[in-house]
Amino acid sequence: MASNKRLLILPGDGIGPEVMYEVRRVIDWMERRRAVTFELDEDLVGGAAIEATGKPIQPATVEKAKAADAVLFGSVGGPQWDRLGFELRPELAILTLRRELGLFANLRPAVVLDPLVDASTLKPEVIRGLDLMIVRESTGGLYFGEPRGIETLPDGRKRGVNTEVYTTDEIERVGRVAFELARKRQNRVCSVEKANVMESGLLWRQTMTALREREFADVELSHMYADNCAMQLVRNPRQFDVIVTSNLFGDLLSDLASMLTGSLGMLPSATIGAPEPGGKRHALYEPIHGSAPDIAGRGIANPLAQILSFAMLLRYSFGMDEEAGLIERAIVTVLGSGLRTADIMAPHSAKVGTQVMGEAVVRELDKLAP
Ligand code: IPM
Ligand code: MG
C-alpha cells in the first residue's frame, strides 16, 4: 500500500550533490519496486545557499524541514567561504537545523563491515566485528552556551569566550536515547565527560547515574573521562556498545571512532528530536564525512555513507526496517564483490567512481528483491 512520506533533500556543497544523486537512484528503486511513494522536496543550504541568497540557510528552508517527515542532508562548507564570520558560514546551516528542529541526539554508529576490515589503519584483530554507537548531545554544551564571543579588553588584548553548560533535563533526554538504544543492542552505556575537571561534567555523571537508577536499572552504565575514552577507542574499541557524551566531546570522539572503520565515506548518522504529541519526531540524516572540496566534481567520491544515511532514515523515521536492511545488504555484497571507491581502495579490488558505485548498489537491490 502506498503512503506519502515527506522528505526534504538538502545536498549542500562539495561532494554533497554528487553523492545525493546516487541516493536518488535508490529512492527511484524503492518507488518502483516497494510500492512506497516519497513526496520529495529539495533546497539549498551552506555555501550553495550563500551564493544564491546571501545566507547559509533561509527561514523558508527551516520551515520546510519542520514540515517534512525527515530531512536528508548532504554536507556543507568549502575554502571559499572560510573567511566569513560565524553568522554567515556554511556550517551555520546544519547548526541552525539542529537548534530550530530541537535535534538534540546525534546518533553516530561506527560499524566495521567485513569486506572492509583491511581498510582500517588498525589491525584487523582489533576492529573486526566492531559495532558501536556514539550518542552525541547536539543542541547544547559548548556549541550553543552563553556567554560567547570575542571582546576587546581595556588594555587592547582580546578575549574569546565559549561556555560549556548543561542542565539536568538536557542530560536526561539524551541519556534516555542512549539507554533505549542500548536495550536494543548489548545493553551497555558508557557515559563520557571530564568530571575530574569540569562542573558540567560532574553534573553529567551524577545525572546519568540517577537516571539509570530511576528508569534504566536493567541497563549497565559505566563512566569514563573523555581523554581516556579517546585512548580506549584506539586500544580496544570493541569494549564499547553505546557511548553517550556532550556536543564537543561527541564531535571529537565520533571522528575518531569513524576512522576505526577505515573510511569516513562509509558512515551515516541520524540526529533526532523529542517525540511530539502526534507521534512525529523531527529527524535529520547525514553522512559523517564533510563536503570534501578537494575531490568535489570529479566523480570519485564514495556515495555509500549518503546511501546508508537514507537507509537509517527509512529505519528510524518510517519504520521500514526491511527496506533499510536490503540497502545495507546490497552494500555489503557490492563491497564483497571487490568494487571500491578511491577512499576504500584495497589490493586486488576494482576502483570505481561515484556513479558506478551507486548503480552497483541498485543492481544488487534488484537481485535481492526483484
Ligand atoms: C559534525 C561537524 C559539524 C560539527 C560542523 C560542520 C559544524 O563537524 O557534524 O561533526 O562540529 O558539529
Ligand atoms: Mg565533526
Image (cartoon, rainbow, N blue to C red):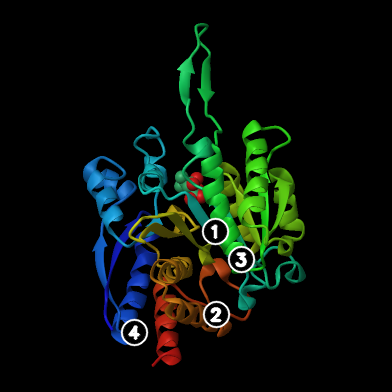
Tell me if label 2 and label 4 are in contact, CB under 8 Å. no
Amino acid type of the residue that numbered disc 1 sits on in the rendered structure: Arg
Location of mark 3 (residue): 183
For the residues labelled 3 and 1, say whether their Cβ atoms are less than 8 Å apart. Answer: no
Of badges 2 and 3, nearer the viewer stands: 3
Question: For the residue marked with disc 4, what is the amino acid?
Answer: Arg
Classify mark 2: helix, strand or loop: helix
Distance CA(mark 1)–CA(mark 2): 19 Å
Q: Earlier in the sequence, mark 1 or mark 2?
A: 1
Quadrant in which the C terminus is drawn: bottom left
- Residue at label 2? 332
In the rendered image, residue 220, in percent from the top left (x then y), is placed at 71, 59
The tag earlier along the polypeptide, 3 or 1, is: 1
Q: Earlier in the sequence, mark 4 or mark 1?
A: 4
Image coordinates for residue 249, horizontal then vertical, percent: 60, 44
Residue tagged 4: 34
290 and 329: which one is in front? 329
Amino acid type, mark 2: Val
| Sequence-earlier tag: 2 or 4 | 4
The Cα–Cα distance between marks 4 and 1, rounded to whole angstroms, is 27 Å
